[in-house]
Amino acid sequence: MRIVLLGTGNLATRLGIALHTRNAEIVQVYGRAESKASHLAKLLGCSFTCYKEEIIDETDIYILTVSDEAINEVLSGLSISHQLVVHTAGSVPMDVLAAFSKNIGVIYPLQTLSQNREIDFEDVPICIEANTNANLEKLKELAGLLSERVVTIDSAKRRQLHLAAVFVCNFVNHFYTIGEKLLQDAQLDFDLLKPLILETANKAMQFSPIEVQTGPATRGDEHVIGQHLKMLAQHPEWQKLYELVSEDIRSHRLEDPLRQLVKQDGKNDIK
Amino acid sequence: MRIVLLGTGNLATRLGIALHTRNAEIVQVYGRAESKASHLAKLLGCSFTCYKEEIIDETDIYILTVSDEAINEVLSGLSISHQLVVHTAGSVPMDVLAAFSKNIGVIYPLQTLSQNREIDFEDVPICIEANTNANLEKLKELAGLLSERVVTIDSAKRRQLHLAAVFVCNFVNHFYTIGEKLLQDAQLDFDLLKPLILETANKAMQFSPIEVQTGPATRGDEHVIGQHLKMLAQHPEWQKLYELVSEDIRSHRLEDPLRQLVKQDGKNDIK
């Protein structure tokens, strides 16, 4: 399967390298910035272009890794006949591709990618979707090169997955940022929080998160909550967040007899 | 060093077991619920009591693991002379103990503890504080049995650390809960999010979180943000949270030239 990669960002780089090392045949990279396109092409041992007119049509599949807004713009310049065109976006329906090809699909790796951090796709869920069974088989094969967790998910479910991912990844990472800044305020090292961050994530591997929720809001410890809100007086936006999240934790907490017993009898946890 | 454990919750259990397996001498457990006190005493090979009058005074240290509100109540019944009295709470100043003993301190293990999940204290930062150097040395010795990361931190800094811990642990775990519920709404398995949760936490081990923030808010992708807010119409409290956190991410994002270049040129990440 000959592949043309459209885009040169983090996803193009990570996906391209992963496919290349698994012997997929990437024939060309397209990107507007020559330095990035040539760099990625070198890594993948293929040609590159910065001009839409030069994107080759002798390929089996175009993989779009450009930003959501750029999808239409890039595709409008291509002469597509039989080729399979797929995008990689969480929140873009597959059907936006229908105007450009009769063979369309999506490959959405559910992971957060950053510069300077390598990623092993092996465990990463790759969500695929296609408009025909034949195309779906092709994408299964391609995604199967990357990961052992290939799942077929339609556009509506993928969008919901993306929304959930924003909470458990992007928003969580922002709370790490808040934690780091609160520690800086007290001249404390962010390293102190790292075992706690890891353990919190590891607990979610084993338990449903609601079952292992700890902290002042779950315990109903109004005294500590009041103290924390006062301490956040210099950061009104975090104060508001603290209030909202605590309120939401309270309204969702499990009212099981065991938790009640623990609450009466002693300390449920450190927080 | 002879130890009396006051409290029988998760912290008492985890701390007691860890100290016991490192050959600390726990002589008694006190807890109001007989079943819990006797169970923990059995695990620790010591006696127990449910009556304050029976708490023994032939000890070197009392470790309080009861809830914040119960500290005064438990201590008011004790006849303390020379013994060191320490509590284990993040947000309670050491000085609340001054009314009960001339030897006081704090041992605060910065970790989230749950039933049914064992914890290795080795990497857990143990924050200690004491009112004299001699008491601090005693606590260093005791905490050193548990962990290689013993740090001396005063009450004000410990309170700030606790506040930060609420964000990076309790609030983060609540976002895992929201993620799980959003997936349930779409009949998707929470397992799909697990590699993302772990990778997000692991990235924070290596980078300052603000440097690796990804997602629609950092990218300034108003289209996806608008879509997500619409999708949350059934959950107005999460919609409000989504708005607030996104706004806060936007106001904190790093405006470095590299990020700008990536934004113009292609896709920064999958989210």
Image (cartoon, coloured by chain):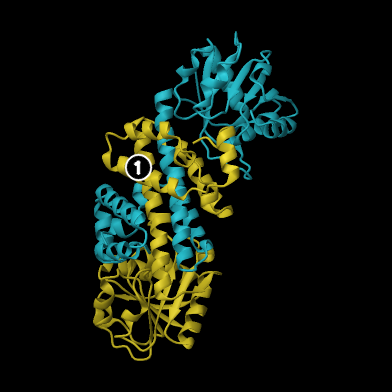
Chain colours: A yellow, B cyan
- Percent x, y of residue B40: 69, 33
- Percent x, y of residue B52: 64, 19
Which residue is pictured at 33% across the width and 52% down the height?
B241
Left or right of B111 in this view: A112: left
Q: How many marks?
A: 1
Placement of A83 over or under B57, stated as above or below: below
Which residue is pictured at 60% across the width and 9% down the height?
B82
Task: Residue under label 1, please give it.
Answer: A243
Q: Residue furthest bottom?
A: A81
Report the front residue among A75 and B257: A75
Report the front residue among B179 and B207: B179
- Percent x, y of residue B99: 49, 12
Which residue is pictured at 64% across the width and 28% down the height?
B31
Placement of A86 over or under B226, stated as above or below: below
Placement of A244 over or under B214, stated as above or below: above
Judging from the image, mark 1 belongs to the subunit labelled A
Report the front residue among B143 and B170: B170
Left or right of B133 in this view: A12: left
Whether residue A240 is visible here, answered yes or no, is: yes
Examine the image and state in which quarter residue A93 appears.
bottom left
Which residue is pictured at 34% across the width and 91% down the height?
A81
Examine the image and state in which quarter residue B93 appears.
top left
Q: Amino acid at mark 1?
A: Glu
Q: Secondary structure at mark 1?
A: helix
Placement of A213 over or under A100, stated as above or below: above
Left or right of A154 in this view: A22: right
Left or right of A198 in this view: B209: left
Report the front residue among B264 and B120: B120
Q: Residues within 10 Å of mark 1 (few under 14, many from 20)?
A: some
- Percent x, y of residue A236: 27, 39
Whether residue A117 is visible here, answered yes or no, is: no
Examine the image and state in which quarter residue A53 appears.
bottom left
